[in-house]
Image: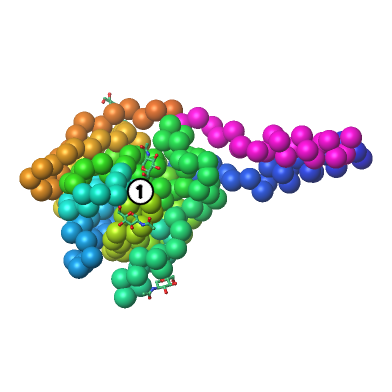
Amino acid sequence: MRSFTIFSLLATAVGVQSASAPVVQGNTVGATFVAELPDKKTTTLRGSVEIASATDGKGVKVAVSLSGLPKEGGPFIYHIHEKPVPSDGNCTATGAHLDPFKAGESPACDASKPDTCQTGDLSGKHGNITSESFSATYGDLYLATLPTDPSYFGSLSIVVHTSNKTRISCANFVAKGNTAPGTTAAPSGSGLPFPTGINATSVTSKVNTGGPTPTTPPLQQPSNSAQKMVAGAGALAMAAAAMML
Ligand SMILES: *[C@@H]1O[C@H](CO)[C@@H](O)[C@H](O)[C@H]1NC(C)=O
Ligand SMILES: *[C@@H]1O[C@H](CO)[C@@H](O)[C@H](O)[C@H]1NC(C)=O
Ligand SMILES: *[C@@H]1O[C@H](CO)[C@@H](O)[C@H](O)[C@H]1NC(C)=O
Ligand SMILES: *[C@@H]1O[C@H](CO)[C@@H](O)[C@H](O)[C@H]1NC(C)=O
Ligand SMILES: [Cu+2]
């Protein structure tokens, strides 16, 4: 029975580890959500993050357009958080990041393995905000526009932080011109200047000195995301085996 017990322990050890985020298939074509940062006395930061289903339903396309970032405190980071902003606008109340597969805060997100990052860690997966005005468009394979999916973000919020994690501003996602589930209509009128065909996980950004003028930079082929070797599982398994032997 010894080997059976070891096997069970190994399975348990692996089971408590984080799983890698699955690629989201079957997002409703046309489903679009936008989070519009509010006018706020404490910051000049304004702009929006718009996220729509990819045209083939595999993941999403993200369009970030921000201006008025502080002169100090960068590089700035931004995430989808696990709770919405309450009506009083308190960004602290949005909690931690959207992280349905429990990637956790450490190790820090490795952009070359986006499936191992917290699902909501957009700056970790796609790049920090490094200029006073910032625009970027990119694909993300791990976000869902279907409310039944654990990676659904449509009822959640976006938070922009300084490098020391101070929350500068935040906003809730709001559905925008969604088409009914099951339709195959192109997302015309979504306002997203995306080309057809997904080329996810590429990131581009552009410095705008004259205010936000979102462009559609060429998207690149995604890097192959390596299958996650669960960190620590090996060590745990060895410890478990050592205890048995
Ligand atoms: C974080 O950085 C901002 C901008 O540099 C600064 O105003 C603030 O005092 C810092 N907060 C903490 C807790 O270090
Ligand atoms: C904001 O939310 C946090 C977390 O819920 C809470 O601890 C804090 O008191 C709130 N701040 C204000 C000003 O309401
Ligand atoms: C992004 O900014 C954060 C906060 O300053 C920093 O910890 C992180 O290393 C930066 N990431 C990259 C890829 O530069
Ligand atoms: C991604 O982009 C490359 C060139 O940039 C193109 O050859 C390829 O067909 C694109 N892939 C998809 C799925 O659109
Ligand atoms: Cu955050």
Q: Please give the range of residues in magenta.
A: 225-245
Quarter of the image holding residue 45? bottom left
Relative to 35, say whether 244 is above or below: above
Can I make out residue 114 in this image?
yes
Quarter holding the C terminus is top right
Instruction: Residue at 21% x, 49% y: name it.
Output: 71
Of 54 and 157, the residue lying toward us: 157
Of 121 and 52, the residue lying toward us: 121
Instruction: Residue at 21% x, 43% y: name it.
Output: 131
Residue 190, image x, y percentages = 19, 52
What kind of element bears circle 1?
A: loop
Ligand 1 image position (quadrant): bottom left
Q: Tell which residue pokes out farthest to the bottom in this image.
A: 88
Residue 162, image x, y percentages = 32, 52
Say if the magenta span includes residue 72. Answer: no
Relative to 122, say whether 178 is above or below: below
